[in-house]
Amino acid sequence: MNDWPEGFSGGDDRGSRYGRGSAGAQPEGARVMRQVRRGGPAGPPGQRGPGPAAPPYGVPQQPSYVDGGQGPAYDDGQGYDSGYNTGQVYGSPGGPGGPAGPGDGRTRGPRPAPNWRRRIKWTAITLVTLVVVTSVATYFWADSKLHRDVDLSKVIDRPEGGKGTNYLIVGSDSRDGLSDADKKKLHTGSAEGKRTDSMMILHVGGNGDTLISLPRDSNVEIPTFKGSDSGKMYPASGATKLNAAYAKDGPTLLVRTIEYNTGLRIDHYVEIGFAGFANIVDSVGGVEMTIDKPFKDKWSGADFQAGKQKLDGQQALAFVRTRHAFAASDLQRTKNQQKFLSALAHEVATPTTVLNPFTFYPTMSAGLDSLIVDKDMSLWDLASMFWAMKGVSGGDGTSMNMPISGSVGGNLVWDKAKVKTLVEQLKNDEKVTATGD
């Protein structure tokens, strides 16, 4: 009995082809691959390949992969090479999907040229973003370190403001933060509380900046004032030394006294103590000064030779505090203070300080930790002050003492006519022609 299905009953017609149970030795052709294209025109509908109708049992004639083999040659006239003849991997160079040419089959086409314009653009964007982020972070860090402890709104009966900006810069003898060893090293003494060791008005305007020292022994009248802490009104106390105003009720009374005696409105207040001053100088690596004459002062610890030299924090503090070594003690000291502060501002604003983060941030930290300012002071105001001081030291502005006409009881008396002219010129932001000692 024939066990094959009816569709396979034509045994004699199967010939000697291999497969489907045939015992013939001839192997069956390679199975048709979907991606293989057959040569010749397509047959009529229902015919699976070119040439005559499909052989019995619905099996199409298979193509030959070797030249001269049975069936039609596998060549569509377009140079297709399956790679089976040569042993090449399907899709490698020389075969389908790869460029023809010598090599080991891994050769690639030329790498495209880099897009330098695109690279430069993104590099620039990255750098600008980094600068902006760093600048914003630095601004908020620095702004948070300012000690805005002085409220100028508590000052009463204030004069009208003028053109430009007036800063009152005060150096106090505060010993806060100093150990006993520091006090001995810096020759500060151990007095309690704090007093004004130096006072300056810096006018920043469009006709040149002006730095005016106010001797602490200036003979002034302390007017009626409102207590900064108590809020009570206190009567005028008559003529006394200018630094007594600060000792009596701090910065607000000092501002009130200066405004009352000059008629010039103070816009911003800046104060620094002994320790902060020395720390700022050390943070910039010292300040170079030219000292005209040698001098010594056992009270301040000063011991200087004439000539150009770099002062560290300890030496700088001694230089600006020395008064007993000079005949005109307070006036000469204020001149030294102006000279040094201008040099310090110039050193702080140099590119070697500003552009070097290892110098810039310690200097900023030392300065901001040491400064006491008014509540309306911004970093921009502070920067404007330092740049103006640098300009004064560079010869673009004017530095002077408050005009003095004489003394009474050891106190220095201001020249009222010259002071009036000076104040009017400052209020109108005019070029200062008034002179002082």
Image (tube, rainbow, N blue to C red):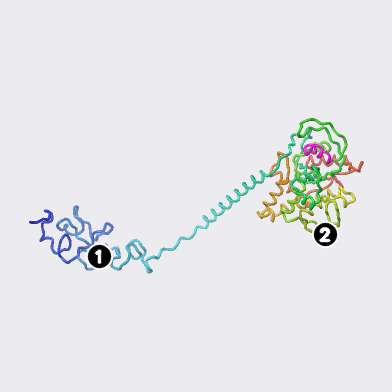
Q: Is 62 placed above or below 212 here?
A: below
Image coords of residue 51 (percent x, y): 18, 59
Q: Dot 1 corresponds to which residue?
A: 65
| Quadrant containing the N terminus in the rendered view | bottom left
Which residue sits at x=15%, y=65%? 24
**Callout 2: SS:** strand
Q: In this view, does 413 lie to the left or right of 378?
A: right
Dot 1 amino acid type:
Tyr
Q: In this view, does 387 lie to the left or right of 424?
A: left
Which residue sits at x=73%, y=56%? 285
Image coords of residue 367 (percent x, y): 71, 48
Q: Is the magenta stretch mostly helix, strand or loop?
A: helix
Question: Which of the pair 72/31 is nearer the observer?
Answer: 31
Q: Give the range drawn in magenta.
A: 242-255
Q: Dot 2 corresponds to which residue?
A: 307
Image coords of residue 297 (percent x, y): 86, 53
Q: Is residue 249 magenta?
A: yes
